[in-house]
Image (cartoon, rainbow, N blue to C red):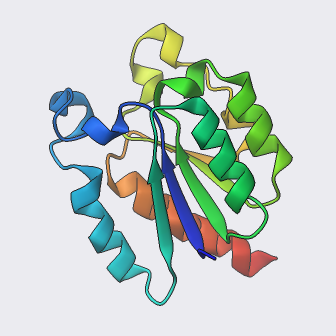
Amino acid sequence: MSDLVIINGPNLNLVGIRQPEVYGYQSFDNFLPELRQQFLPLQIHYLQSNHEGLLIDWLHEFGFSAKGIVLNAGGLTHTSVALADAVASITTPVAEVHLSNIYEREPFRHHSYLYPVCAFSVVGKGMEGYREALIKLLEINTQK
């Protein structure tokens, strides 16, 4: 079983191509090997889907065994009660991550259904937000 899990939601497979002025020029696939190397000997499992149900299935699958889950739900952050319910239902701490600062963007992005059910949020730090979230999740584990 994976020690740490990163789950990216809709359209995050296009990071590096889609609106690079907002989301950056680096793809997550290019960033992931650096994270995996930094966090050795822990295993980081990575999943991305444009389908809400798969995100929920993965939260259920890893949500009782992983040390932590980093979740960038993309646009589902602002719309999905079902995704928030899935996070609230599991015991693994979940970090909400957003590449851009959602609170400085369009008003509909200011509300997060995930914020109240996640252990913490990291917003507006680009790819570095994933690294910060993984570090904080490991700190939470040492406090248990």
- Provide residue 132's location: percent of width, then percent of height: 46, 61
The residue closer to the viewer here, 79 or 46, is: 46
Left or right of 88? Residue 49 is left
Residue 107 shows in the view: yes
Residue 12 appears in which quarter of the rendering?
top left
- Provide residue 65's location: percent of width, then percent of height: 74, 70
The residue closer to the viewer here, 95 or 41, is: 41
Q: Quadrant of the N terminus?
A: bottom right
Q: Residue at x 41, y 11 (%)?
A: 106
- Image height of 29 relative to 19, above or below: below
Residue 69 appears in which quarter of the rendering?
bottom right
* Residue placed furthest toward the top: 107
How many numbered discs?
Answer: 0
* Residue placed furthest toward the bottom: 41
Q: Residue at x 39, y 18 (%)?
A: 105
Left or right of 30? Residue 46 is right
Q: Quadrant of the C terminus?
A: bottom right
- Provide residue 38's location: percent of width, then percent of height: 36, 80
Residue 24 appears in which quarter of the rendering?
top left
Residue 119 shows in the view: no
Q: Residue at x 37, y 40 (%)?
A: 99
Q: Residue at x 47, y 53 (%)?
A: 47
- Provide residue 23's location: percent of width, then percent of height: 26, 35
- Image height of 27 relative to 30, above or below: above
